[in-house]
Image: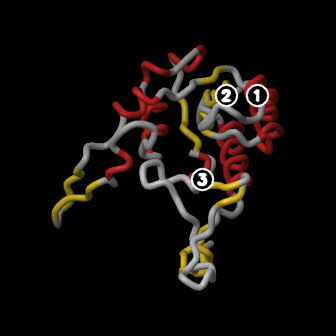
Amino acid sequence: MSSVVSQVVVHSDPVTGRWLRANGRPVIKTDANGVPVKTWILKSEEKGSDVNLAAHLLRDAYRGACACAVIVSNDSDLLTPIRMAKADCRMTIGLVPPRAKGSVELKRLVDFKIDPRVHLLAGSQFPHAVPIPDGAIHKPARWRWGRHIARRSVFRLVRKPVLTAGACQTEPFRLIRCRRSTL
């Protein structure tokens, strides 16, 4: 779901793109009269992604569509569906946490965990220019170096068979995506 809303503009670091803060609060841009500067933005939110992920995980588990699922998430709302898939269907569940901090309980519950490393993600990126019939699509410059890795990289990383673990080395598995915003 998306909408166009008016929002104040926050000063950001030109190198990292992160908001500048003073006393823990974002520094708001103001005009010459001290009035906060506003701009129109497209605000998009994902609705129901947790429910969709849980439903697809359980559907695949009960149908026997895969023996192993790899979940990219830190969301503790997935604890119950993971427990059900493991207990009822003996499914192997792996986790690729997009950030180091996250649900400790979720990390304990899964059968294996893969920590994405920047150098592996960098090697999994699409090339700078992806050819299309009308020319090429170029990825933003900030995706090319350092910590700013394309979101798709995590998913490509998990699909590489050399990075599978445990029972999943010999069995097929399905990559299940949770939220874009978590990456």
Q: Which badge, 1 or 2, comes first in the chain's sequence? A: 1
Badge 2 amino acid: Ile
Between marks 3 and 1, how big is the CA–CA gap?
26 Å
Question: Height in image: 50 above or below 34?
Answer: above
Badge 3 amino acid: Ser
Question: Height in image: 115 above or below 3?
Answer: above
Q: Nearer the viewer, residue 119 or 25?
A: 25
Q: Quadrant of residue 159?
A: top left
Q: Which mark, residue 86?
A: 1
Q: Position of residue 170 (x, y in %)?
A: 51, 17
Q: Which badge, 3 or 2, comes first in the chain's sequence? A: 2
Q: Nearer the viewer, residue 83 or 151?
A: 151
Specify few, some or many for label 1: CA neighbours under 10 Å numbering under 14, 14-19, or 20 or more. some
Which residue is labeled 2 in the image? 93
In the rendered view, does 83 fall on the left or right side of 11?
Answer: right
In the rendered view, does 28 fall on the left or right side of 15?
Answer: right
Q: Which secondary structure, mark 1?
A: helix
Q: Which badge, 3 or 1, comes first in the chain's sequence? A: 1
The answer to whether the residue labelled 1 contacts the one labelled 2, judged by CB atoms less than 8 Å apart, is yes
Q: Nearer the viewer, residue 69 or 130?
A: 130
Badge 1 amino acid: Lys
Labels 3, 2: front one:
3
Q: Position of residue 59 (x, y in %)?
A: 69, 45
Specify few, some or many for label 2: CA neighbours under 10 Å numbering under 14, 14-19, or 20 or more. many
Q: Which mark, residue 181?
A: 3
Q: Which secondary structure, mark 3?
A: helix
Q: Residue furthest top?
A: 166
